Amino acid sequence: MRATDRQFWAVLLGLLLVTRIAGFVFGVVNLDEDEFCVIGSMIGRGALSYVDVAEFKPPLTHFFFVPAGMFGGISIWPMRVLGALWLLCTCLVLRAAAREWTGDELAGKAAAILALLASVCEVPSISAEMLMNLPLALALLFWIRGHWLRAGLLVGLASLFKQQGAILLCAFAGGLLYQRKPARLASIALGFCIPWLASCGYWAWRGHLIEFFDWTVVRNLHYANAISFDWRAAASSVVLCLSATAVPWVLAVRQTCSQPRDPAIVLSLWLTWVAVAAGGRFYEHYFLQFVTPLAVMGAPAAARLLRSADQGRRRRAIAAATLCVCIYITYTLYRGAAGLYPNQDPKIREVSGWLREHTAPDASVFVWGHAPQLYFLSQRRPASRYLTAATQIGGFDPGMLPTGFDVGPYRSVRDIRLLVEDLEAARARYVVDTAPADIHHWRQMPLAKFPELEQYLREHYRVVASPANAEIFERMP
């Protein structure tokens, strides 16, 4: 192995390790990880997404988390290892894509490093955005090689991790129209459709095509009903994420302005803003969708900078990248040391501790609120297809709602009815009401606003404990 190759692997693996270290030290670092780990463990026991598990994400994200429940209980540790390997593979595919696009080995290596630098906009979690980046990177690689069907197929696979992955299909279509090669659109479109048709066929074979279509398509189209746009929060997220990934962005913008070879790759970067803004919420993990186009787009400019005779510019760029990484590592480790990750919440730990101590290991529990950590930490079985009550309240994030916001016009009567049916069918032993404890801002969603559920609980349950002010209901004989 040449010295330059050894240096590349040292930098790549070193960056991978230090940027993911907080996840290995502190465990779960994002609320979605709790939910996905629980979903994965349920699927491992035979549950079917969209029937036994109600969730908006496409199925591949659910299936990826099955190992979380394969080694006794529910654990994040298998996912930490798989996530690191997945991210490493993404970097290496981006290296190959940039190398073939530019014909430059150094640009390829730069792309792999830029992918990690572009990932420091979010704590080191395993998210649908991170997972879809590997098939998107492969799609770009096959696009560059001129394999249209494969490129479309991989975009389809990416969109089965998260629907927004389909934005790359728009970039490819724009690139072909710009090059006046519309005939190739058919191959890309066919490739894209194959994974979705296969998924539809599987759920149809299981007798639940309607549920699959409802959760992955219809409900996502209605997602706009739950938007409570906050300009200040959006602007804050944009500034924070662009600052954290300043080096890849500066390089990508420079390349955009220097007559890049392929308009589709330019579009893949700038159309991603549509995917990031689609939900109107601008969570930090949404910005992980930029990793793939930023890495490839910024690679030629990075290679030119590394070869530049201007050592001052090169040193300033390396210093800026190093500073961003150091701030990121300090921030993620500080959050863990200060107990700011979701599973470190004292209220969550007190409630989950009560469930572990006072309930049987096979007891079924439903949590009224948005606190999948309680299932994860208590290791108790969900009593309903709904792991959170977000669907019942209209899909809102209470933390983004103004005080006193009335969810009455938006609440889903159908999902409240299905929830009650689940509780009755499972003879759910315990129900945890997180509203009195104001866990995840749920004080704005008291049971009194949902009389059908409140009446059912009053008729069949009694309050037996109030750890951290959360009310725990136990089913009456």
Image (cartoon, helix red, strand yellow):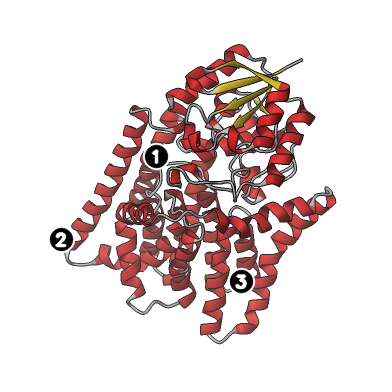
In the rendered view, tell whether residue 175 sits above or below residue 40: below
Q: Is residue 85 visible?
A: yes
Q: Which mark is residue 312?
A: 2
Q: Position of residue 183 (x, y in %)?
A: 65, 83
In the rendered view, tell whether residue 75 sits above or below residue 36: above
Q: Please state the total of marks drawn on the protein image.
A: 3
Residue found 21% across the figure and 52% down from its top: 319
Mark 3 secondary-structure assignment: loop
Residue at the outermost top position: 358
Mark 2 secondary-structure assignment: helix
Inspect the image, locate mark 2, and give the three-letter code of the amino acid beneath it: Gly
Residue at the outermost left position: 312
Which residue is disc 3 drawn over?
Answer: 147
Inspect the image, locate mark 3, and give the three-letter code of the amino acid beneath it: His
Which residue is disc 1 drawn over?
Answer: 17
**Is the residue marked by circle 3 packed among few (<14), some (14-19), or many (20+) residues within 10 Å?**
some
Inspect the image, locate mark 1, and give the three-letter code of the amino acid beneath it: Leu
**Is the residue marked by circle 2 packed among few (<14), some (14-19), or many (20+) residues within 10 Å?**
few
Q: CA distance from mark 3 to mark 2?
A: 41 Å
In the rendered view, tell whether residue 197 sits above or below residue 453: below
Mark 1 secondary-structure assignment: helix
Report which quarter residue 376 is drawn in: top right
Q: Is residue 286 left or right of residue 34?
A: left
Q: CA distance from mark 2 to mark 1?
A: 28 Å
Q: CA distance from mark 3 to mark 1?
A: 34 Å
